[in-house]
């Protein structure tokens, strides 16, 4: 505990147990829980006739990820545990929106509102293809 070599180890365990996304295994740097994102998403999706379908698929995801082990980061918005990083969750939403066939305009609007792809490694590349930001 008091030797220098343990510092790295402790940091490692801290990250492993407290901050990792269950889906991608990466550190959750922007703790915003799926519940909060889903609320905003449902608000946005309301205007589409397919919103029931979207909500249904959303609930499937929520069922799998809404459990607590008391070790996670807290959501910056509601304070609940966050087990999945916003990127993974919005990446799921992105696929759901895409599958529902809402069209390019809806897709680019979705990406404008729910872009957590800060590293530009995933769906934000498609946003740029649509004409982006
Ligand atoms: Zn993730
Ligand atoms: Zn929240």
Image (cartoon, rainbow, N blue to C red):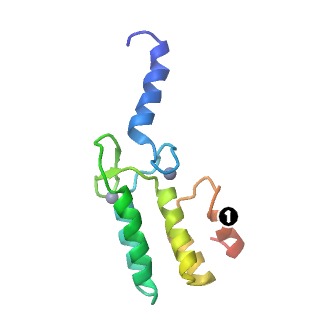
Q: Nearer the viewer, residue 74 or 97?
A: 97
Judging from the image, what secondary structure is the residue with disc 1 in? helix
Furthest residue toward bottom: 49
Q: Is residue 79 above or below residue 124?
A: above
Q: Is residue 17 left or right of residue 114?
A: left
Q: Is residue 54 left or right of residue 99?
A: left
Q: Residue at x 63, y 59 (%)?
A: 122
Query: Quarter of the image containing the N terminus?
Result: top left
- Image coordinates of residue 13 in percent, x first then y, are 43, 29
Q: Residue at x 37, y 63 (%)?
A: 62
- Image coordinates of residue 87 in percent, x first then y, are 51, 57
Q: Is residue 48 above or below residue 24?
A: below
Q: Residue at x 51, y 57 (%)?
A: 88
Count every numbered label the image shows and give the total: 1
Quadrant in the picture for residue 2: top left
Q: Nearer the viewer, residue 42 or 99?
A: 99
- Image coordinates of residue 128 in percent, x first then y, are 69, 69
Q: Is residue 8 visible in the rendered structure shown here?
A: yes
Query: Quarter of the image containing the C terminus?
Result: bottom right
Q: Is residue 109 visible in the rendered structure shown here?
A: no
Q: Is residue 105 left or right of residue 29?
A: right
Q: Nearer the viewer, residue 126 or 69?
A: 69
Quadrant in the picture for residue 19: top left
| Mark 1 residue crowding within 10 angstroms, few (<14) / some (14–19) / many (20+) | few
Is the CB of mark 1 within 8 Å of ligand 1?
Answer: no
Furthest residue toward right: 129
- Image coordinates of residue 120 in percent, x first then y, are 64, 57
Q: Is residue 6 above or below residue 12?
A: above
Figure quadrant, ligand 2: bottom left
Tag 1 residue: 125
Furthest residue toward top: 3
């Amino acid at each position: 505990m008091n030797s220098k070599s343990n510092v790295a180890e402790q940091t490692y365990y801290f990250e492993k147990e407290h901050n990792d996304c269950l889906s991608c295994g990466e550190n959750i740097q922007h703790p915003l829980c799926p519940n909060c994102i889903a609320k905003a998403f449902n608000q946005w999706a309301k205007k589409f006739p397919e919103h029931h379908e979207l909500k249904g698929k959303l609930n499937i995801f929520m069922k799998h990820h809404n459990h607590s082990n008391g070790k996670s980061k807290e959501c910056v918005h509601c304070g609940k545990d966050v087990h999945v990083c916003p990127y993974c969750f919005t990446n799921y939403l992105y696929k759901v929106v895409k599958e529902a066939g809402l069209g390019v305009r809806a897709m680019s609007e979705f990406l404008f509102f729910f872009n957590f792809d800060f590293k530009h490694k995933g769906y934000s590349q498609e946003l740029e293809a649509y004409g982006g930001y």
